[in-house]
Amino acid sequence: MLAVAALGITSKLALRTLSWPDLILWSGIGYVLVVPVLLIMGQTHLRLTAGSGWAIASAALAIGGLMLFYFSLGLGDAGKVIAVSSAYPAVTLVMAAVFLSEALTVGRVVGAVVIVAGVIIVTLAK
């Protein structure tokens, strides 16, 4: 949680002198350094299975989301951008109900409403 929280701060600081594509480049370099370590340690290996398409889709969404995150940080206040981006559990809840047939319980709906209300409060606060 601390690393994700700090990501918004370090990214905003980097964007003072770099562009969002520069941050994507550095993120890519980080992945290029981590992947060989995972392969050498036997933690993963390249294989095509029924889930590979979903893994590729996940990677594309992660890359696209990170690009939009960096772009947004370059335009707005870190506190607001992070608050809006942290509302993803509410979106995931709805999508999980639609695509995975997961239950929408009262507790989950109340939690999602609290998340959205929190985002509204943080983004509107002066």
Image (spheres, rainbow, N blue to C red):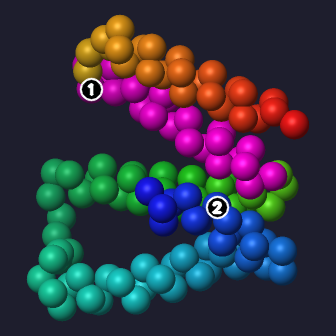
**Nearer the observer, disc 2 or disc 1?**
2
The residue labelled by disc 1 is 100
Residue 19 can be seen, yes or no: no
* Percent of width and height locating residue 101: 25, 19
In this view, 52 is above or below 94: below
Q: Residue at x 18, y 64 (%)?
A: 48
Q: Give the residue type at disc 2.
A: Gly
Q: Residue at x 45, y 34 (%)?
A: 89
Q: Give the residue type at disc 1.
A: Leu
Which span of residues is magenta-colored?
Answer: 77-101
Q: Nearer the viewer, residue 59 or 16?
A: 16
* Image quadrant containing the N terminus: bottom left
Residue 10 can be seen, yes or no: yes
* Image quadrant containing the C terminus: top right
Q: Secondary structure at mark 2?
A: helix
In this view, 29 is above or below 66: below
* Percent of width and height locating residue 65: 57, 53
Q: Residue at x 17, y 75 (%)?
A: 44
In this view, 97 is above or below 5: above
Q: CA distance from mark 2 to mark 1?
A: 30 Å
Which numbered circle lies on residue 8? 2
Corner quadrant of residue 17? bottom right
